[in-house]
Amino acid sequence: MELFRLTRKKYSKVLSGKGAALKGGRWNSAGVELIYTASNRSLAMAEILVHFSLATLPDDYIMLTLQCPDKTPTKEIKLKNLPKDWNIFPQLPNTQHIGDDFVLENKFLLCRVPSVVTQGDFNYLINPQHKLFSKIKIVKREAFRFDRRLFS
């Protein structure tokens, strides 16, 4: 299975959940390491784009293509099982607890979650503490430029 991650160049060499653990995110509390990835390149872009304007967008993004082993143990969070307010911004602790529990249980390497940004698409959370984490490989690094028309 291929997954995609759009990241700043200085963070593109190593996969770790340390960045997400600094402040937390929709699916993790501060202090809980988690790696956010997307099921396709467009979603990876959209998930970054919602946080910037053209004036504040850094120009050093790298698109990572990750390879996960076939039949990777994956937890699936279904939309129907999420709280009513799961997709508001800023996020509430209810979704953070879901991701925290995923990491703490340590049963699965991946967790498939619905995207807030693109309905019908899915993000994959990677648990860097899982015993199979070393099986995930960065197989491609490509400089990524945002099309300026996205901001017009």
Image: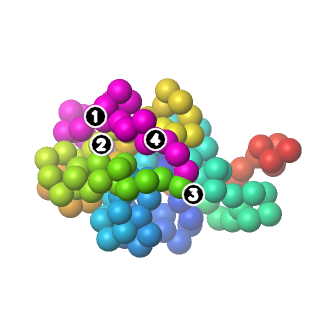
The amino acid marked with disc number 4 is: Asp
Decide: is 114 above or below 55: above
- Badge 2 marks a residue whose secondary structure is strand
Residues under numbered marks 2 and 4 in contact, where contact means CB atoms less than 8 Å apart: no
Q: Separation of disc 2 and disc 4 at Cα?
A: 20 Å
Residues under numbered marks 2 and 1 in contact, where contact means CB atoms less than 8 Å apart: yes
Q: Can residue 46 be seen here?
A: yes
Where residue 110 appears, as percent x and y from the top left, is 27, 44
Where residue 71 appears, as percent x and y from the top left, is 21, 33
Residues under numbered marks 1 and 3 in contact, where contact means CB atoms less than 8 Å apart: no
Question: Magenta stretch: residue 27 in it?
Answer: no
Q: Residue at x 80, y 47 (%)?
A: 151
Where residue 67 appears, as percent x and y from the top left, is 35, 44
Question: Magenta stretch: residue 86 in it?
Answer: yes
Disc nearer the start of the sequence (4/3): 3
Disc nearer the start of the sequence (2/4): 4
**Mark carried by residue 111:** 2
Where residue 120 appears, as percent x and y from the top left, is 49, 27
The amino acid marked with disc number 1 is: Glu
- The crowding category of the residue bearing disc 3, from other C-alpha atoms within 10 Å (few below 14, some 14 to 19, many at least 20), is many
In the picture, the quarter occupied by the C terminus is: top right
Please give the range of residues in magenta: 68-89
Q: Which residue is mark 3?
A: 62
The amino acid marked with disc number 2 is: Cys
- Badge 3 marks a residue whose secondary structure is strand
Q: Separation of disc 2 and disc 3 at Cα?
A: 23 Å
Q: Which residue is mark 1?
A: 76
Q: Separation of disc 1 and disc 3 at Cα?
A: 27 Å
Q: Main secondary structure of the magenta part?
A: loop
- Badge 1 marks a residue whose secondary structure is strand
Q: Which residue is mark 4?
A: 85
